[in-house]
Amino acid sequence: MEHVASKAIEDHWDVEEIRNEFPLLKNTMHGKPLVFLDSAASSQKPRVVIDAISQYYSSQHANVHRGVYALSANATDLFEAAREATRAFIHAQYDHEIVFTRGTTESINLVAHSFGQKHLNQGDEVIISAMEHHSNIVPWQMACEANGAKLKIIPLLDDGTIRIEDVRDLISNRTKFISLVHISNALGTINPIQEVIDLAHHHDIPVMIDGAQAVPHLPINVVELDVDFYAFSGHKMYGPTGIGVLYGKEKWLEDLPPYQGGGEMIKKVTFEKTTYNELPFKFEAGTPNIAGTIGLKAAIDFLGDLPSTSIEQHETSLLEYGTSLLKELPGLHLIGTAPNKAGVLSFIIDGLHPYDIGTLLDHQGIAVRTGHHCTEPIMDRFGIAGTVRASLGLYNTHEELDQLASAVSKAINMLK
Ligand code: 7TS
């Protein structure tokens, strides 16, 4: 890895060196070299992540926080080292502000459930935006329903952005919480989260940011942002599936009731009363995904060896190039044209169904996602059933975008 990092810095971005670290990218699909353009759904994994998990199961596995024996103590050290690496990755103040979850979805459910239970009452309001992933809609709907609160929606403009004035207009003296996506998975829009956090705090309203699509693309500093909660998934940032993170400010994690009950999260259990463990264990009931945290740390170390400005530069360059190619194609409309955008190219083509285009692209070795991308309200807003979405990762190349454009062009000719 040291070699990859220094080479990447030297050459700014040696994408071939980086691709060599990802075994799956050597696959073929339908006899064609794989062009993987679905990293927003889940990114591929570098060898260091695969090896870390394999080594853990081969020689280091035992349950954590339990055994007095050396193997268990060592597994605990590895698990807690992953927490420390995660803290450093997002520049949180304390390790105990990092709660391991199954992913972004579980992180949001935890906050919606626990915050709702303690702080939402009849007539209160929660604000989200019209560009949320279902996982930042449904848990809040459930929390509102359970506690008699209402969901208010920040509207979406034609280019796929939101306006801070609209957030200001929605805030009332009943607003108890704002939950907003950092980067939209369907549109690529990078939201003005700092402005929203500052505005919300001016009204003493806590904010949660869904960072699932942001952490693989941008450096995150939760202290600078002053965000109350920040959620993300390991599998979109080159780590394993089944592991995710909830960052919460100490004062909020102390304040909220536990989400799930069971082992690990308790201090003392009797049939009359249970007292809860300290942070972060209060929110980590049951045996955790130990291997997942170890893979996550390997992914963090992998990203840490690469200059994050170069990740951004490379992906921005790909996005601009891909946008310019696709815009030339007849009948193609990009959905999501925000000035501040990350690696998502979502599009529709007049008269063609996204699924048919996706299928033809698949036959040419190109993996894209089609459909509503778990953001049905966005599709409703634009009056469409779905899009074709090419999403970019740090391993994608300009040549792959040439292949995408030519394959889409071929598909248009075949289907028309
Ligand atoms: N929030 C955003 C913005 C997402 O893009 C996703 C997953 C989630 C939350 C949920 O993350 P999970 O890891 O808990 O599932 N997005 C996508 C996608 O765009 N295609 O497949 C999954």
Image: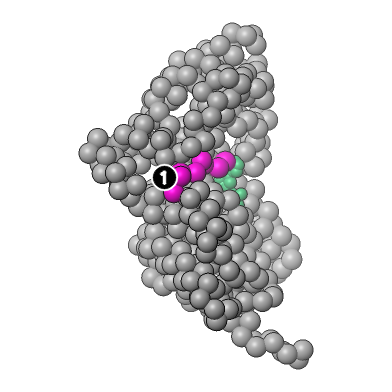
Q: Residue furthest left?
A: 10
Residue that appears at 66% across and 66% down:
113
Q: Tag 1's secondary structure?
A: loop
Of residue 304 and residue 2, the one placed in the foreground of this image is 2
- Taking 353 as reference, is 240 left or right? left
User: Which of the 4 quarters of the picture holds residue 179?
Assistant: bottom right
Residue that appears at 49% across and 14% down:
406
Colour setup of the view: one colour
Residue that appears at 35% across and 41% down:
311
Residue 47, magenta (yes or no): yes
Residue 59: give x, y in percent of width and height. 52, 61
Of residue 25 and residue 109, the one placed in the foreground of this image is 25
Decide: is 324 above or below 146: above
Residue 188: give x, y in percent of width and height. 48, 38
- Few, some or many residues within 10 Å of mark 1 (<14, 14–19, 20+): many
Residue 82, magenta (yes or no): no
- Taking 197 as reference, is 181 left or right? right
- Residue holding disc 1: 217
Residue 126: give x, y in percent of width and height. 60, 60
* Region rendered in magenta: 41-48
The image quadrant where one finds the C terminus is top right
Q: Amino acid at mark 1?
A: His
Residue that appears at 53% across and 16% down:
407
The answer to whether any part of residue 157 appears in the image is no
The answer to whether any part of residue 392 appears in the image is yes
Q: Main secondary structure of the magenta part?
A: loop
Decide: is 96 above or below 218: below
Decide: is 125 above or below 9: below
Of residue 82 and residue 368, the one placed in the foreground of this image is 82
Residue 332: give x, y in percent of width and height. 54, 19
